[in-house]
Image (cartoon, rainbow, N blue to C red):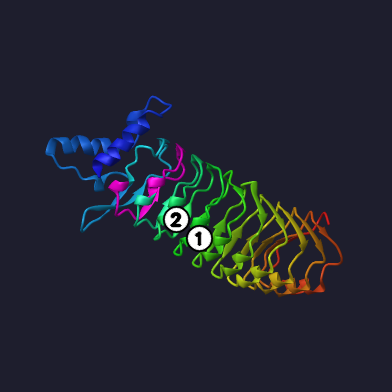
């Protein structure tokens, strides 16, 4: 394990842009120098490394915000079969996400966000059946969302926002029965209609689909998300009327539908949303009057309906 970590660390040196490569993960170098004198290498004491104390196996690698620059090309995933968490977010890592990341079969949390990774999301990610959190947001990923992700029944958080993904949301997204957070906002080129299968995500708390190119109507099946408290669909090309069924989402605190092409009247059922704090309906094609039922929205802090 220590050799695999040091091999990857050595590969990162080539990409340092400053003349202080010796400052990169200094505890690893220091511990290795000490180990060379005593012939006792213990990576469990290295910075960012956590082990199962009883068995001495690496279970967590957390190197977030460490100014790492390089790729995952020399990261030997097969050397860490017991890894539960890999967190490399907020660095300057780039290149593709290797398909062999699927060798981390026990992984429950994978966070590669806020880097410069490019290329497609490998469908092999779907082989990580124990994964509960997948966070790739704020990278340069392209291509479509793999339908194979729908097989990850233990996934609770799927965060793919702020990339360059394109194409539709796969119907298989509705198979993620444990999902509580779905964020694919700010990809710009995600398109097609919002699949009705999102109505299967009954445990969902947050859905962010804003700043994309989704079209068609808002699916009425959205009313099945009874635990939803944030619904953000603003800045798309959505048409048709606002489904009155949204008024059944009694836990809703944030409703953002602005910058679309929604038409018709504001549903009177919105008066049921007594927990709603923010409602943005601006820059649509809505007509008619503001429903008197809005007086029941006693938690409302902000109502934005300009540009209708």
* Residue 39 position within the rendered picture, expressed as x and y whole percent measured from the top left: 13, 39
Circle 1 — which element? helix
Q: Are marks 1 and 2 in contact (CB under 8 Å)?
A: yes
Image location (x, y in percent) of residue 47? 31, 44
Asked if residue 19 can be seen in this view, the reply is yes
* Camera-side residue of 268 and 122: 122
Name the foreground residue: 299 vs 67. 67
Tell me if 292 is positioned left or right of 236 in this view. right
The kind of secondary structure element at disc 2 is: helix
Q: Residue furthest right?
A: 288
Mark before the other along the chain sequence, 1 or 2: 2
Residue 229 in sight here: no
Q: Quadrant of residue 286?
A: bottom right
Residue 166 in the image: state x and y as whole percent.
61, 47
Q: Residues within 10 Å of mark 2 (few under 14, many from 20)?
A: some
Q: Which mark is residue 296?
A: none
Number of the label disc, if any, that sits on residue 126: 2
* Residue at image mark 1: 150
Quadrant for the C terminus, please.
bottom right
Q: Please check the rendered image and state whether residue 82 is part of the magenta-colored stretch, yes or no.
A: yes
Q: Residue at x 37, y 56 (%)?
A: 107
Query: Which quarter of the picture shows residue 130?
Result: bottom left
| x and y percentages locating residue 54 in the rendered image | 20, 59
Q: Nearer the viewer, residue 276 or 192?
A: 192
In the image, is residue 280 part of the stretch drawn in magenta? Answer: no
Disc 1 from disc 2: Cα separation: 8 Å
Total numbered labels = 2
Q: Which residues are magenta?
A: 78-101
Q: Residue at x 73, y 61 (%)?
A: 217
Q: Nearer the viewer, residue 18 or 244?
A: 244
């Amino acid at each position: 394990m220590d050799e695999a970590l040091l091999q990857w660390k050595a590969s990162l040196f080539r990409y340092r842009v400053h003349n202080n490569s010796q400052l990169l993960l200094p505890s690893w170098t220091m511990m290795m120098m000490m180990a060379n004198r005593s012939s006792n290498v213990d990576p469990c004491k290295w910075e960012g490394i956590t082990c199962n104390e009883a068995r001495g196996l690496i279970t967590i690698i957390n190197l977030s915000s460490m100014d790492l620059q390089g790729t995952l090309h020399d990261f030997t995933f097969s050397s860490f079969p017991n890894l539960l968490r890999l967190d490399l977010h907020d660095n300057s890592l780039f290149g593709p996400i290797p398909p062999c990341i699927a060798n981390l079969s026990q992984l429950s949390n994978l966070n590669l966000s806020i880097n410069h990774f490019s290329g497609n999301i490998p469908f092999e990610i779907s082989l990580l059946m124990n994964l509960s959190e997948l966070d790739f947001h704020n990278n340069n990923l392209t291509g479509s969302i793999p339908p194979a992700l729908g097989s990850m029944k233990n996934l609770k958080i799927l965060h793919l926002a702020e990339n360059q993904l394109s194409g539709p949301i796969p119907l298989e997204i509705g198979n993620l029965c444990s999902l509580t957070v779905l964020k694919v906002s700010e990809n710009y080129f995600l398109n097609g209609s919002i699949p009705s299968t999102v109505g299967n995500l009954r445990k969902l708390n947050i859905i962010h689909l804003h700043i994309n190119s989704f079209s068609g109507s808002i699916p009425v099946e959205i009313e099945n998300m009874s635990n939803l408290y944030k619904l953000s669909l603003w800045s798309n090309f959505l048409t048709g009327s606002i489904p009155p069924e949204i008024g059944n989402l009694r836990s809703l605190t944030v409703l953002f539908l602005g910058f679309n092409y929604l038409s018709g009247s504001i549903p009177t059922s919105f008066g049921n949303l007594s927990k709603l704090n923010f409602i943005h309906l601006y820059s649509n094609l809505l007509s008619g009057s503001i429903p008197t039922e809005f007086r029941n929205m006693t938690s409302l802090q902000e109502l934005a309906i300009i540009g209708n």
